[in-house]
Image (cartoon, rainbow, N blue to C red):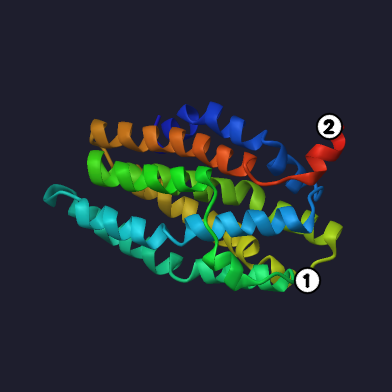
Amino acid sequence: MNFYDRLVKETEAQRHELYTVPQLVDGLNGDISRETYIAYLTEAYHHVSHTVPFLMSMGARLPQNKKSLHKAIIEYQEEEVGHEEWILNDIAACGADKEVARASTPNLETQLLIAYNYDYINRKNPVGFFGMVFMLESTSTQIANKGADAVKDKLGLPKNAFSYLYSHGELDISHMKFFEETVNQITDPADQAAIIEVAQNTFRLFANVMRAIPHAYEVKHAA
């Protein structure tokens, strides 16, 4: 079994936990309100705005014998620059004020996801951040296009309110192939363990981010 396949296998339980969060399940069926979608985008803005700083921190913290990973990190950085602005534009296309979203304080659950990754990069092992990359990109390929189609159709929102989701649904399929090739070149057992640890934990943390999003549909059906 190559390392990528091992990573997929060892994160199965955490992925299942994320994919059963009511906000996510209902989003894939289009059964969420405009307010829930905007709340999701707002939290996405907050954590996505840290993706490039995460990658920069990761590259800066790599020891000399791991510098071969710089090429992959630079490629990810180039792909991710400006994605948080796509999210703000989606918020505006939903009829909300993107500057209010930009200035808002992220939920505690989102702050924990962000803080955990900075802490792991700086205090433990920067290579572990590939676990966060795996969580984000594998999740996008599983839910982005389907969720965007469903919510757009149910809420009657314009397609330009879903540029972030549609772009990631398309981009991350090719990204996942590049990611698979990259991590399969990582042979250090400590680095592999770090990637698995971060992936498992960020799936759990991202599930909490999703659970914290206000979800009127869930409340209505629980009544």
- Residue 189 visible in the displayed image: yes
Quarter of the figure with the N terminus: top left
Residue 116 lies, in percent from the top left, at 38, 42
Q: Quadrant of residue 77?
A: bottom left
| Structural crowding at the residue carrying mark 1, measured as other residues with C-alpha within 10 Å and reported as few (<14), some (14–19) or many (≥20) | few
Residue 87 lies, in percent from the top left, at 59, 66
Q: Secondary structure at mark 2?
A: helix
Depth check, front residue: 7 or 108:
108
Q: Which mark is residue 158?
A: 1
Mark 2 lies on residue: 222
Residue 51 lies, in percent from the top left, at 42, 58
Foreground tag (1 vs 2): 2
- Residue 185 visible in the displayed image: no
Identity, as a three-letter code, of the amino acid under mark 2 = Ala
Q: Going 56% across and 34% down the picture, which residue do you hit?
A: 15
Drawn side of residue 71 relative to residue 162, left or right:
left
Q: Is residue 122 above or below residue 161?
A: above
Q: Secondary structure at mark 1?
A: loop
Q: Which mark is residue 91?
A: none
Depth check, front residue: 179 or 57:
57
Drawn side of residue 211 relative to residue 59, left or right:
right
Q: Which numbered disc flags the more N-terminal residue, 1 or 2?
A: 1
Q: Is residue 181 above or below residue 199?
A: below
Q: Going 27% across and 37% down the picture, which residue do you hit?
A: 191
Quarter of the figure with the C terminus: top right
Between the residue at mark 1 and the residue at mark 2, the CA separation in whole angstroms equals 30 Å
Drawn side of residue 85 relative to residue 32, left or right:
left
Q: Is residue 2 above or below residue 112?
A: above
Residue 136 lies, in percent from the top left, at 51, 49
Q: Going 74% across and 57% down the picture, which residue do you hit?
A: 35
Q: Is residue 147 above or below residue 3?
A: below
Identity, as a three-letter code, of the amino acid under mark 1 = Pro
